[in-house]
């Protein structure tokens, strides 16, 4: 399986080179945010305030890691289900977010926004939190510390193993997989 | 009458939760290893290999397999000739959970359902206690992740819907879950009893070892048929397409009301974290 390497921040050029189904090793800074942090992002935006992080060109990882044991950078750090962030993602893509990492399919509205704003949705393997933590070199909480595992953290990652799920051309790895491997039921 | 100190229960619960979260069981490792050969999709194979590597890393570095270290579910079968001493049994279980999630650096994933405020120590646990004959205490712990639990449901089917209705419901739940519950999954199905019993049966069904069929030949056949149907859906490991969507289907059944056909589906992720001890 061919592997493509990319580095954050992402721009239209780097985003347009990738296709659904590509195996990718991603390096650079990314941000964790999940349910509660996204809810706060929306509240801040509604009040007209700036987000606690500048998301232009950035990648958000839907992840709430386990607490690190002494001497470790981070605990297990796998993806959570992305669809719970579907209500918020188009707004963030409109503000320049270029990538999202999670697991599971996205809504049509998110897929449309991915095409419109030229971004990518990556899948990390659900349940591979120990493996994924090996790619994390630094972990710093940058906002909403009170949310504990749901705080927004900046991660420095090296060769984080991902698959491209949704690309800017409207492809979807989940649909590609189903159409290729689904067998008609005979019963 | 045999006396059991509740502190022993607390210690066992603590040890079991850390073990379940860090060490992939040998039976799951073997099943996933076989799945690498069974799977035909390259991406699916890659995901399965990642999961096996993940288990090695978790074991070698003593870190959790998954960041979702679950809501703490505890089943206890208490021998009726046991007398607990040293305090409340449920309190002891909660202490064991609190200690496991603190000392094991496990994520606290329990919150108030309305305010969403984290309880801070992963308590309260979900405790199911039943009385059985004898003077032993069997403790089964299941740290249950949210991703798989979210694709679980109870449905009150009508008797006329029968076995085809059960099959359609179960397969549809897996289809709807897609990649979200972390396939390859294990499917627990509870059939019969009443509304709440069917849900409990579906969770208990998950506790049966891989490949072990329901003792009723008709139900055993249904398990295999549903497994085959599910693996034709094409979801595959990680949802990236493939033929290994479920590792097994287990049905547990009880008689029900003549007017009802309660069916519950409880989905379990590939890590299938379950541990037990007998005191």
Image (cartoon, rainbow, N blue to C red):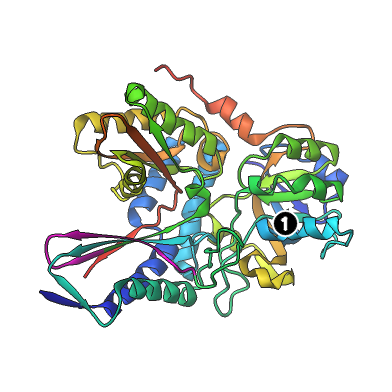
- Name the image quarter holding residue A138: bottom right
Name the residue: 16% across, 67% down: B136
> In the image, B103: left or right of A135?
left
Q: Could you tell me residue A76's position as x and y percent?
A: 56, 64
Q: Is residue A63 above or below residue B99?
A: above
> In the image, B251: left or right of B110?
left
Q: The disc numbered 1 marks a residue on which chain?
A: A
Residue positioned most to the top = A186
Name the residue: 53% across, 67% down: B107
Q: Is residue A55 visible?
A: no
Near mark 1 (Cα within 10 A), the count class, few <14, some 14-19 or many ≥20, is some
> In the image, A43: left or right of B179?
right
* Residue situated in front as seen by the camera: A72 or B143: B143
- Name the image quarter holding residue A104: top right
Tell me the magenta residue range.
B122-138
Residue occupied by mark 1: A39
Q: Could you tell me residue B173's position as x and y percent?
A: 48, 35
Q: Could you tell me residue A131's position as x and y percent?
A: 56, 59
* Residue situated in front as seen by the camera: A171 or B124: B124
Q: Is residue B4 above or below residue A31?
A: below
Quadrant holding the N terminus of chain B: bottom left
Please tell me whether residue B234 belongs to the stretch shown in magenta: no
- Name the image quarter holding residue A65: bottom right
> In the image, A129: left or right of A122?
left
Name the residue: 49% across, 56% down: B53
Q: Could you tell me residue A130's position as x and y percent?
A: 54, 61
């Amino acid at each position: 399986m061919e592997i493509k390497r990319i580095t954050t921040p992402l721009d239209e050029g780097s985003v347009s080179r990738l296709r659904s189904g590509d195996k990718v090793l991603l390096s650079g800074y990314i941000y964790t945010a999940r349910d509660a942090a996204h809810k706060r992002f929306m509240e801040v935006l509604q009040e007209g305030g700036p987000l606690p992080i500048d998301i232009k060109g950035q990648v958000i990882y839907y992840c709430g890691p386990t607490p690190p044991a002494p001497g470790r950078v981070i605990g297990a750090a796998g993806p959570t289900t992305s669809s719970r962030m579907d209500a918020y993602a188009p707004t963030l893509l409109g503000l320049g977010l270029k990538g999202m990492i999670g697991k599971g399919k996205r809504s049509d509205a998110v897929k449309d926004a991915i095409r419109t704003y030229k971004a990518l949705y990556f899948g990390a393997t659900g349940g591979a939190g120990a493996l994924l933590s090996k790619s994390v070199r630094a972990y710093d909480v940058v906002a909403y510390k009170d949310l504990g595992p749901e705080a927004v953290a900046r991660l420095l990652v090296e060769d984080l193993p991902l698959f491209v799920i949704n690309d800017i051309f409207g492809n979807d790895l989940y649909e590609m997989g189903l159409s290729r491997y689904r067998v008609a039921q005979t019963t | 009458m045999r006396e059991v100190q509740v502190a022993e229960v607390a210690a066992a619960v603590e040890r079991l939760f850390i073990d379940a979260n860090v060490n992939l069981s040998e039976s799951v490792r073997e099943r996933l290893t076989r799945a690498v050969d069974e799977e035909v999709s390259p991406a699916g194979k890659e995901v399965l290999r990642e999961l096996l590597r993940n288990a090695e890393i978790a074991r070698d570095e003593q870190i959790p397999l998954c960041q979702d270290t679950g809501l703490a579910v505890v089943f206890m079968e208490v021998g009726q000739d046991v007398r607990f001493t040293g305090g409340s049994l449920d309190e002891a279980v909660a202490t064991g959970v609190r200690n496991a999630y603190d000392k094991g650096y496990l994520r606290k994933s329990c919150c108030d359902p309305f305010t969403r405020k984290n309880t801070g120590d992963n308590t309260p646990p979900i405790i199911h206690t039943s009385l059985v004959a004898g003077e032993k205490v069997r403790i089964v712990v299941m740290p249950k992740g949210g991703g798989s639990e979210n694709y679980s449901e109870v449905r009150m089917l009508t008797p006329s819907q029968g076995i085809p209705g059960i099959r359609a419901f179960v397969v549809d739940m897996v289809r709807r879950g897609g990649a979200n519950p972390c396939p390859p999954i294990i499917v627990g199905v509870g059939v019969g009893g009443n509304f709440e019993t069917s849900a409990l049966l579906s969770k208990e069904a998950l506790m049966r070892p891989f490949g072990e069929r329901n003792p009723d030949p008709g139900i055993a056949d249904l398990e295999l048929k549903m497994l085959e149907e599910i693996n034709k859906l094409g979801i595959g490991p990680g949802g990236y397409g493939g033929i290994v969507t479920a590792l097994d289907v287990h049905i547990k059944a009880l008689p029900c009301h003549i007017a009802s056909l309660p069916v519950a589906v409880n989905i379990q992720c590939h890590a299938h974290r379950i541990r037990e001890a007998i005191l």
